[in-house]
Image: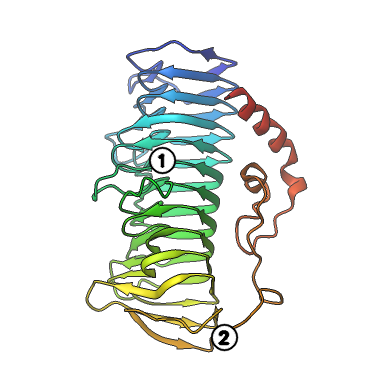
Amino acid sequence: MNFSMLHFVTQSSNVSPLCVIRREMNFKLFSFAFGHVSRQFNSFLYGQNEKSRIFIGNSVFKQFLQSSIVIKSNNNYNSGVFISFVNVFKNCRGTDGSAILFNSNGNQTVIKNAFYDCRVTRNGGAIYTTAYEFVCESCCCFWCCQGLASYCYGSTIYSLSNRIVKLNNIMNFQCPSVLESPWHLQIIILGGKSQINSINFSFSGSQYSTGMALDTSNASNVRYVVTHASKSGNSFQVSTKSNDPEILTEYISFLNNTNTKGLIYLCGAVGSIYRCLFYGNSGSIGFSDCAGSSLSIYNSYFDKNPSWGSGISTHVSCTFNFNTLTNLPYHMINEDSCILSMFGPKYALGNTCNYQNFMPHLTLLISLLLWAQ
């Protein structure tokens, strides 16, 4: 049996979830589209059925005091599929994952979503996931924040995956703002093989490290990351569970960051980065307080002779003291609106997406944003 809800609008304040999909229910598909749900004490959706496919699309979720969507499962196998496509989450609150809490071993896909002011007291300001496979593409995050304690991570995404994580075209703006300064990171990935492409971090602050961290023992790829105007202990973190997890890291741009420790924080990592750009930054390049950390830098550009700091073992075929950004093999940050960046992400370094492919979705999303006001 399939169940669909269309054009559902409510502003009532419920003390229990509006929709509950229990294990006993025989839903193959639950779909919710073109809805507007706001001012809720509890979640909109609480899903416990391991066999259900859940689709949430073209909707607005606003002013929640608990995670807007909660998917939980005690079953380690056949744990369902959750898809979130073209949604807006605004002013959401929670303990973990204020917009989406996916505590299941199923598969989770989040595409073309916008997260505004999503905050938690612990981990994953916008998304907390333990998905077997987690895919997040073309999303924008504004002013999101995790808890302020030192054990809280991920102002936008906290991922604990069993198999694979794919992140593509994600923009993080003031997540969190410099004035809040929690301890750690905007995106943290714990476990699983990661494929990271075209991520932007702009105007954020943290006490220890901001940007992104991979803590994994699996082969992973990280390409086209921009960390721009951050003010923190570190701008980018490299941490691994083994000395050589085969992480390919390339095309990372460090632009106008102010760091009290170093641009790159090394936590037990031994690896290399390639074809990176360092421009307008203050502070040293590397910082490590973990024994055995070592990073090599290849074929990269520096606007000055840097202070290397700690953990940088060697630099090979690098260019120093260049005076202009022209004719370098990098696409610079384009200050377009975030909504446009979702559908042709110029914020993502080196991306050459075609805007025309996404224009129908752009019109719909702008309508949703106006509806969310």
Q: Marks 1 and 2, how far apart in space?
A: 39 Å
Q: Is residue 330 above or below residue 57?
A: below
What coloring was used for the rendering? rainbow
Q: Is residue 168 visible?
A: yes
Residue 325: x %, y % from top left: 66, 73
Residue 34: x %, y % from top left: 60, 22
- Density class for disc 1 (Cα within 10 Å; few <14, some 14-19, many ≥20) is many
The residue under label 2 is 319
In the orientation shown, which residue stands out farthest toward the top?
12
Q: Is residue 305 above or below residue 59?
A: below
**Residue in front for this viewpoint, 36 or 196:** 36
Q: Amino acid at mark 2?
A: Thr
Secondary structure under the numbered disc 2 in the rendered image: loop
- Density class for disc 2 (Cα within 10 Å; few <14, some 14-19, many ≥20) is some
Secondary structure under the numbered disc 1 in the rendered image: strand
The answer to which quarter of the image holds residue 263 is bottom left
User: Residue, x 54% and y 31% (percent of image)?
Assistant: 88
User: Residue, x 67% and y 27% (percent of image)?
Assistant: 367
Quadrant occupied by the C terminus:
top right
Q: Amino acid at mark 1?
A: Ile
Left or right: 27 with respect to 270? right
User: Residue, x 22% and y 76% (percent of image)?
Assistant: 291
Left or right: 332 with respect to 89? right
The residue under label 1 is 127
> Reading the chain from its start, which is encountered first: label 1 or label 2?
1
